[in-house]
Image (spheres, helix red, strand yellow):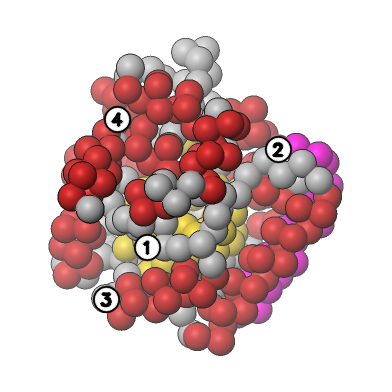
Amino acid sequence: MLRATLLFLSRRPALRRWMETSQFAQPLTRRFVAGETLTDAVAACARVNQERFLVSLDHLGENVSTREEAAASTTQILAALEQIRVRNLQATVSIKLTQFGLDLDPELTYSNVAPLAERAREIGSRVEIDMESSEYVDRTLDIVTRLHAEFGCVRAVIQAYLHRSEADIRRLNELRIPIRLCKGAYQEPPTVALQGKAAVDANYLKLAALLLADGTDPAFATHDDRMIAPARPHPKDRFEYQMLYGVRRDLQKRLVAEGYRLRLYVPYGDAWYPYFMRRLAERPANLWFVIRSTLSN
């Protein structure tokens, strides 16, 4: 019930406008969002790189409605890639394709993201293409496949709660496209997605086994010790773990100390509200942390 409520609130435009402009709300995000500017994100990236964490920088935003907004997103990510090069950061970039015009035109989207993949290849980085709600899966994977064929420096995200994900993983494995496996953070109907934590967890473990057997540089995005366990016996250069900035820092530090590759997903920007609400919905403990932090200030 709490998860459904938070996901419902994440889609309320009026609440989003208030939260993203409210001085009261901004302190609530500090644990999970690096800041509003690229400068903030680069500083956070440099700091956690020193602690031996890899990073994926994510300029927050989604569902743009104009070609100008989509083009501006390309400019923002090219600037992030340039900072990765100049500062010699151990980082990739993460993007959502609706931020680059997927609601407008898939060809427009491809023309906006192809320069990102090209630049990432030039500097030895990668573009991690986040998955959004189920209505975007086919269009997203079509673009991922094209980018991989042309540039070869992209990673797809597959959500374990979708019924279709096993077939998608098998196809992407055959194409040698790297995959990040996550559980999924959108509200989907039973016809599209598994319902309930136990069912999603079981499918996550099944899909993780497929990636460990046949995947190319797989990444496992989870903060759940049981989901982390299957990869542990495998060579540490064969995969990486991925976790969210500010979530389960104790576990993050322990895995790095044990020699595992761990990439932190570091978001930044002023369009933080949908991301923030989905993080609360994914892990209710995050909500209680925010409440405690607010009361202690």
Q: Mark 1 points at which residue?
A: 263
Relative side of 241 to 108, left or right? left
User: In 3D space, how far apart are the residues under numbered discs 3 and 2 (Cα atoms)?
Assistant: 37 Å
Q: Circle 2 — which element? A: helix
Q: Give coordinates of residue 201: x percent, y percent.
A: 29, 30
Quick check: 284 above or below 176? Answer: above
Quick check: 39 above or below 143? Answer: below
**Magenta stretch in the rendered image:** 103-124
The answer to whether marks 4 and 3 mark residues whose Cβ atoms lie closer than 8 Å is no
Say the numbered circle drawn on residue 201. 4
Q: Give coordinates of residue 45: x percent, y percent.
A: 41, 72
Q: Mark 3 points at which residue?
A: 51
Q: Circle 3 — which element? A: loop
User: In 3D space, how far apart are the residues under numbered discs 2 and 1 (Cα atoms)?
Assistant: 26 Å
| Residue type for callout 2 | Arg
Report if residue 220 is visible in the image: no
Q: Is residue 107 magenta?
A: yes
